[in-house]
Image (cartoon, helix red, strand yellow):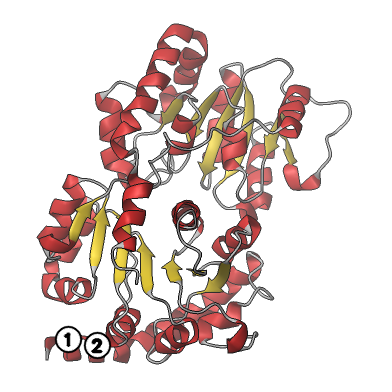
Amino acid sequence: MKRFIFLLLYNLFLPIFLIVSIPGYLIKMKKRGGFGTGLSERFGIYKRPKSEEPQGGLYVHAVSVGEVFIALKFIREWKKTHTEPVVLATSTATGHQVVRDAALPGVRALYSPLDVPGLSGRCLKRFNPKAVVLIEAELWPNFAEACHRRKIPMIMLNARLSPRSEGRYRKVKGITSLLFSRLSALGAQNERDKGRFVGIGVREEIINVTGSIKFDVLGDTPSSPRAEFKDLLRTMNGGKPVVLAASTHAGEEALIASSIRDAGAFPLIVPRHAERRADVVKDLTAAGFYPVLRTEKKLPAPLPDNLCYIADTTGELRDWTALADAAVIGKSFLARGGQNPVEAIAAKVPVIFGPDMTNFADLVTLLNSENSVWQCEKEMLTATIAQVLSDKKETLERKERAYHALRVHSGATNRSVALVDSFFS
């Protein structure tokens, strides 16, 4: 009865939420190039015949770019031992583009259906998966019920729960326990996350501590620096060290670039959202820079002394990171929560971030306990960058400690594959 009442209320209020949110969502999709890429699939409208769709494989749900990269890493490992097709469903245009650009054999890029009655069942009937994988804590009531009715096991991987989210979920523990009860298994990132999930009503017996696929970097093949990127930076930097401003948010580009310049280095900017390029250029120009966009594909001649480079693309952060002498992590100075520092750590690039890294609190606690990164207020950013670039011995030691601190997550991808495989039949 409780489940019936919950679903009834959810489906009564959901249409109101959709009416309010869908116009803004469609505008965002237009800005990000979503139209013409199969966006109608979110509404249960499919262009290709059902007979041409992959059947009887694995269905993986990932929301946006970050989750898609985790999903792709999992799928690459999964495909080493499985020949069945994979459907990778995303909610955003940028995530969908990353799936298509990856072009993995046997992987169907899909827009996930809106969580309204009927659409989830229509989607599952179309692909008839043997199992469903959810990347991180992305669990929708109608989709979960549709899987349950069809007896499709549903496994959540790379699951984490911040203390703030735990507090919110505890207030509605009766609802969260109902929703999470539809899971067949949950792969938590660490013991703390396991305890938090138990605290909000998830059955302890279905939780496995698998580690973080995102942080499972020790088994990755290191990126070979892209020659064209390396040559381009050598042309622009005037012999200065290159400092990357990674996944920046509004206002941070000018702040971080100015600190990089004042520390005697060359600013390489990779904004979190490429569609903000016009605002980024405006802010950097106002800060006294001559900004050049990667999408313009040309450099001014002669090169001005106040040049800075903006990689306004999607999916190239790892390639730029491999060429940096240091990385400053965005969303940690003027926005809240921080962005993921793992790619820089995996590339053995020294990492600097601001005071707010709450989205990665456990990781930052681990890194700080090993004295392996630099964390500072915005007023100290110039001095911190200068320290990182000048104290070679300390910088080398710290970046090595950061790399080895991730050993706790080594093998997480394989453990996640084994967990899903135990339900795949």
Q: Residue at x 38, y 48 (%)?
A: 413
Residue that appears at 71% across and 15% down: 239
Q: Identify the residue position indicated by label 2 in the image.
A: 7
Badge 1 is on which residue? 3
Residue at coordinates 74% horizontally, 18% vertically from top-left? 238
Estimate the x, y position of residue 76 in percent, counting from the top left: 50, 53
Q: Residue furthest right?
A: 301
Which quadrant is home to the C terminus? bottom left
Q: Report the side of 339 relative to 270 (left or right).
A: left
Q: Position of residue 181 (x, y in %)?
A: 18, 74
Secondary structure at numbered mark 2: helix
Give residue 368's position: percent from left, percent from top: 28, 27
**SS assignment at label 1:** helix
* Quadrant in the picture for residue 298: top right
Q: Amino acid at mark 2?
A: Leu
Label 1 and label 2: CA atoms lie apart by 6 Å
Q: Around disc 1, counting alpha carbons within 10 Å, would you say few (fewer than 14), some (14 to 19), or many (20 or more)?
A: few
The residue closer to the viewer here, 138 or 102, is 102
| Residue lying at 17% horizontally and 53% vertically, measured from the top left | 194
